[in-house]
Image: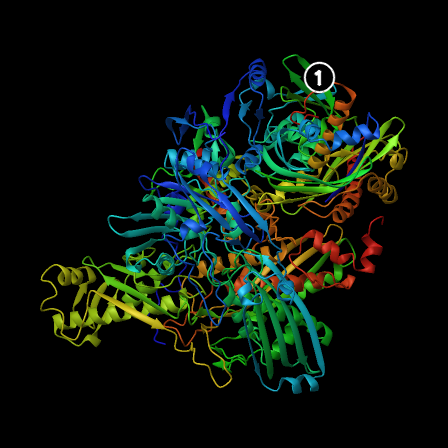
Amino acid sequence: MTKSTSKWVGASLARKQDLRLVTGHGRYTDDVSLPGMLHAAMLRCPHAHARIKSIDVSRARALQGVHAVLTGEDAKRYWGPLPPTIDIGMKVPTVYALATEKAYYMGEPVVAVAADTRYLAEDALELIDIEYEPLAAVTDTEAALAPDAPLLYPEWGDNVQCEWGMTVGALDETFANADHVFEYRLPQHRYSGASLEARAALAHFDAYNRKLTLYCSTQSPNLVRTLVAQTFRFPEHDVQVIAPDIGGGYGNKLQADAEVIPCLLSLATGRPVKWTESRQENLLSGMQCRDYVWYLKVAVSRDGILQGLDAQVYGNVGCDGTCHAAGAGKFLVAAAYVPGPYKWQAFRVATKVAVSNKAPSGAYRGYGKDIANYPLEVAMNRMADALGLTPAEFRRRNFVGKDEFPYQQISGPIYDSGDYAQCLAKLLALVDYDGVKRRQAETQGKSAKYLGIGIASMLEPSGGAVPNCIFNSYEVATVRFMPEGGVLVLTGHQDIGQGTETTLCQVVADELGITPDDVRVVYGDTNAVPYGMGPWSSRGATFNVSCIAEAARRLKTNLREVVANLWQCEATRLDVADGVVVEAGGRTMTLRDLGNQLHLWPGAFGIVPKHVTNPFEVTHYWTSPIASWVPDELGRIRLYSTHPSGSSAIVVEVDAETGKIEVKDIAIVDDCGVIINPMIVDGQLHGGYVQGIGGALMEEFHYDERGQLWNTDLTSYLHPLATDVPDIKCDHVISPSPYTALGTKGMGEGSTIMPCAVMVNAVDDALKPFGVRVSDLPLTPERVIRLLETSAVWRDMYGVGV
Amino acid sequence: MNEMTTNRISVKLTVNGTIYTRAVEPRLLLSDFLRNELGLTGTHVGCEHGKCGACTVMVDGRAVRACLMFAIQAEGASVETIEGLAAGADSLHPIQRAFIDCHGLQCGFCTPGMINSTRALLATNPVPTDQEIRQGLAGNICRCTGYVNIVKAVRQAAAEMRASETGEGA
Amino acid sequence: MKPKAFDYVRVDTLPALFVALQAHDDAKIIAGGQSLVPMMNFRVAQPEVLVDINGIEALRHIQRDGMRLRIGAMARYQDLIDSPQVRACLPLLVEALGHVGYPAIRNRGTLGGSVVHNDPSAEGGVALCCLGAELVVASATGERVVPIADFLVTTYLTDIAPHEVLTEIRIPVPEPRTGSAFREVAKRVGDFAIVNVAALVSVGANEEVSAVSLALGGVAETPVAIDVSRALLGRPLDATRATEAARLVDEATDPQDDNVAGGAYKRHLAGVLVKQALTAAYADATAMGA
Amino acid sequence: MKFEGESRLKGTRAAVWHALVDPAVIERCTPGCQSLAIMAPDDFELVTKVGIASISGTYKGRMRLGEKVAGERYAMSAEGAGPIGTMSVAGVVTLADVGDETLVGYAFEATVGGAMTGMAQRALLPIAKLLTKQFFKSVDQLLAAEAPPAADEVEP
């Protein structure tokens, strides 16, 4: 790792985009209007599984102001099936963005309308008559995998989209000789990012320019461009995707599913067509996540050393996790990372991913790392309790040590760096663990409010590199030197609120010896930027920062060579600081003067030495030195470039009478290596953690056994509100990654990974006097009371009639 | 029954100090009116049923949901949107300044509604406790920040607004 | 999520309102619109004509009239919460309305609109049941006064004909030494209550309960008042008495599962909140000087 | 969701029976019914305008009668779709003598579907109960008078 002077990296710089965003001058997709623009609306299937017997759109077509009414069958004139976004040994169904013969989930788009206004388009939907033949539906994961389950894709012969597994070490022997064997079943429900800006797409097919322009609320305009081109069998270079300001993504905006429907309508009408997803549509189909069940068997020695882990995970991707969105892969990530930050002697994992009649499964903050974290971190607390150890002590005995890096985990990944024990130690101090336990002992039984504290540790593999899909393993970016001495960074990375519009300027400013104000990040336009891939897998601070830092370094080298040539001195005697090229103990030249000389007068001729190929800009390609798709002798591959880590704690007060959980305190200690902007990093920790709290306490897509989704509005799909959470304390450990340009690691997902396990551990701790343990999430007041009702102690104290 | 009513009614209202007269369909929501008829796209739409708060604007000095009012109901009213809060890019309102300073926004989609709710809160309660801030903003969902830095921003804005008032009074 | 087209009529006086209601068979009155407009946006409600009464100044009064408070049907929640008169004589109503939605909803929503909408756990409805309110329903031909219990027919349905309008809510001001309390459990601030309870307890010279009124939301198709006087009257209120009252409530109600919570949980919660509300109201009453 | 109830109708069991299974009576007495088409014996297509407080809209539905035991009992199932989503009601109606009148008992199971499920569900059971009561009340009025008022939209 070469480290330049860090003047800006490490500073809590205010964000560049904030001025426009706080004044109402941001520009989100729905804010864009084009002349002649039409508005789309979609009629969606009310059944979970149904054959479409007939569709009559004649009355809708007759409505004045309606310009196109298209069914799935009509659409086949324009497009093919949705291409896979991910396919790692998966069964890929033949599905379209509009249902054809069959609809597979409640809310699947069946007919699309383009009309003069959204109001009119919705009027037209009421005039469409569809006859369905409802089919048997299956929603539960294990039911979908049962031999007699109704099949979504009969040609598959089952409902399994993919399965995978590995065994490493002497598993049977380890379990046979273990002092303790613990077993757990831990399910988690279905929820999602549900960003405040739902999806939006504005397509314009210009027949006279043979070009399709798509404004889209997406995390990755380049990926969307490829998927749109593949769907329409349209030349990719004739598709331009523009992603303006994005109102939140969290993984949910990484596909081209319903997003292609306005393209279809524009192709059909020749006019721009905008589709802004309603909240109801967003909850029905705007990508859902989580939804799985784990079976865990753990062998532990009597002195509290973890020995063997035998785990199975059954995932539920709804109707699909490959083409509609890339949800299926997260269960493979989960399987590879369930060993967590601990050392093991033997390991076996098996994953089976089921399709069912729920909405398609996409990515959501965590993408399997959360799934890996949940069961083991809950189990760690329960095992510690059985062994008579504190949760912290049990973890300490089993962590990978800080001197053991790089450490190859039993499941294959190489952990780059970290100090897990220090994170945990700092956490216990930050949350005053002993103080809380003391207060718990003092207050217990004095009122109906029961205090509890939970902790968990985590790994946040970040910077994913996934083979055989569009989520590949490289990043390309350009750093461009301008005539007036300023710098443009051209990147396929997208700012979706995480602040890269600012942090990348900090990185480039340090590398080039300029200020962040001298840099502008250009993003969100596929025709302006290289084919970079956008924020997923927290790859901004791994792939993107490394790529841009390297590009800036190379640009700086080139500029020094140019000046050395001008001044006829050694380039090694030159540096750039505060926007000025300085010769050691000698001449100076501002970058503005240099830019002028290079670009304007006298121009490049004569001043650029022969060996400098391009002094104006550097386009650099970066990939991780440790990710690998070549299986080792045990069949293991390495999908992630860095391994941030951390620990967190939640203090709760559970009201044993009403079941309400009050979150009293939250503390997080995070280790994401070198920090570029501490203010932004803490902001990510806060926001990610509260999303996790949402999943733990209230967010849930509630499908009944018929496959009907019960919460299609925000009175029943519950985001955490300001009143649901306290302030959050953050602290940091910094273990630079040896495998990235600046020692940075990803950090966008770690805080969302932990809260479910931490919350369960906290509530278990609070309810210990009643001898109950959490089995299901989310922990709504009603679910807490149902849990307490199983306790005789509770029934005597608080049951009906007491 | 295929006949859709498209009768338009004239509405006259003041938005950010400017008087507008437009003929609109009665069913046009105030949020769509501001965004599409007047091009004031700073008012965001997140749910269209009053739960998310993104479309919160001031109508006659009170915070209301623009998605739960028809534009024609604003006849004669004075509406203030986020665009009207700062006189220019160099003269931000203390609340806007505080949201930037405290990193009280990430994706920014909730921010206009959040700032308007903050305005309303501080107008009636210039010295709110943290709990009062959280109560006052409970009707505005933020998905990015976990609210920590929003609460911090409101605290800062309240202090600055008090200080400037005291300064003016002195 | 855009509403279906409708015709719009704005009226500024009651006579104009009655004319409009006579002229349009399928008219729907819009007051604050905080329940109606979401339903229209979802197209669950598709009125052909919307009659807007927001301009009727005569429906916005909040006025003490002897031993009762008269509230115009268009008085907004926030006006009621801020009203010195309401705060002075109906603290129960102020406490209850504080649980309604969020500031922006309370700025626009009206108590009258909420009562006519009749959600099963509407805070306003529960408070009015507890307070024994009467509703003035007017039409072109005159007006009638309906006790709240008769007015609330079933979920989303009230005793009001298409040509009628709710003009006023009349609430008796509680006797001296009457304490009140409102307790609610909702999933989050501003959500539909799972169960809520309003209680008024009056005490006599010896701190004995001299009168009690109790109402619950979320346990039936509408807010309901439940008579628990036989458990409480004539004695000081203690934990045993409160539990006995909760038992009477349990006998009198049969909460059903709905999208907010299961019936069994609501039943449990009703017991908890009834005890809490009665105990708090009694403490409130006894704290008042004789 | 289950609901049950009973209604006392003025008429002999035979008269009540004939009225209850008569498509003309069903058309007349179903609250808000705008049209009824006979698709097959005991199989009707109905268009109904629902207008209960805030919930309004036109619902197209299918009603089927079956398991008929004349004068004693029959099964009824109805399903409809409209702005609120889909609704279905199915159950059994029984008839018994009470003096010279007839006691009609019913036990129905009601379900809803479609994207409005959550919101609709809060109102479903009360509305289903109300419409059922309204239906039998209209039949009663029809039987009681030669020229009963036509069933219109639901009014309390």
Coloring basis for residues: rainbow
The x, y position of residue A76, in whole percent, is: 40, 53
Locate residue D142: give its quadrant: top right
Say which of C36 and D125 sits in front: D125
Question: Does residue D76 appear left or right of residue A123 in this picture?
Answer: right
Q: Quadrant of residue A147?
A: bottom right
Q: How far from the left and from the top, in percent, is residue C57?
A: 56, 19
Q: Label 1 is placed on what type of residue?
A: Arg
Image-based side of A730 in relation to C214, left or right: left
Q: Secondary structure at mark 1?
A: strand
Read off the chain for label 1. C
How many numbered tags mark residues here?
1
Instruction: Identify the residue shown where x is 35% and y is 46%.
Output: A268
**Along the horizontal axis of the image, is C169 left or right of A284?**
right
Relative to residue A534, is residue C234 depicted above or below? Answer: above
Please indicate, yes or no, whether residue B166 appears anywhere in the rendered image. Answer: no
**Is A745 rendered above or below residue C221?**
below
- Quarter of the image for the C terminus of chain B: give it: top left
Residue annotated with mark 1: C144
Location of residue A523 with respect to A429 vertically, above or below: above
Question: Residue at the location (67% across, 20% down)?
Answer: C137
Q: Position of residue B159 (x, y in %)?
A: 49, 44
Residue lying at the far front of the rendered structure: D41
